[in-house]
Image: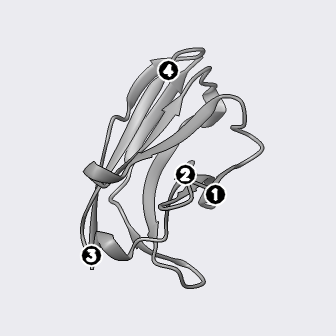
């Protein structure tokens, strides 16, 4: 089991920045990758970014490339999402997730609300 605790969400004006954090505990030695997803009201959950735990391979959704940066601190078992140049369409609940090496993300955080006002 892996437990995830997200923090850092909030209300920000368009063009502003926020940094999300996700701290993992439990079987962290088995983590293959961590990712961020988001779900806006009335929409399906979508992929935002991911990073592998050992090789630091990074992927981004096209909608956030150049604006968001994912990073990780292995010593703290924490992944970050630095979000710059925020737009109203970035408003969503952001979820952190852990991939243990199978074909899906295995564990999910409780979500943190990000609201961007225009």
1 and 3 marks in contact (CB < 8 Å)? no
**In this figure, which residue is indicated by the disc labeled 2?**
38
- Which residue appears at 43% of the width and 47% of the height? 72
- List the residue tagged with mark 4: 17
Question: Is 44 placed above or below 81 here?
Answer: below
Asked if residue 85 is positioned above or below residue 52 in the image, the reply reads above
Label 4 – label 1 distance at C-alpha? 20 Å
Spatial separation of the CA atoms under disc 2 and disc 1: 5 Å
Q: Position of residue 73 (x, y in %)?
A: 36, 46
Mark positioned earlier in the residue sequence (4 or 2): 4
Q: State which mark lies toward you, 4 or 2.
A: 4
The residue where tag 1 is placed is: 46
Q: Residue at x 60, y 84 (%)?
A: 103
Q: Depth-wise, is mark 2 or mark 3 nearer the camera? A: 3
Nearest to N terminus: mark 2 or mark 3: 3
Q: Quadrant of residue 52?
A: bottom right
Q: Which residue is mark 3?
A: 27
**Which residue appears at 54% of the width and 51% of the height?**
38
């Amino acid at each position: 089991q892996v437990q995830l605790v997200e923090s850092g969400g909030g209300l920000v004006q368009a063009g502003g920045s926020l940094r999300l954090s996700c701290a993992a505990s439990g079987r962290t030695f088995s983590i293959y990758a961590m990712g961020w997803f988001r779900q806006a009201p009335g929409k399906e959950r979508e992929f935002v970014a991911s990073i592998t735990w050992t090789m630091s391979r990074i992927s981004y959704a096209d909608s956030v490339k150049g604006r968001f940066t994912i990073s990780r601190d292995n010593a703290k078992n924490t992944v970050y999402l630095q979000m710059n140049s925020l737009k109203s369409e970035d408003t969503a609940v952001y979820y952190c997730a852990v991939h243990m090496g199978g074909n899906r993300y295995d564990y999910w955080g409780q979500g943190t609300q990000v609201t961007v006002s225009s």
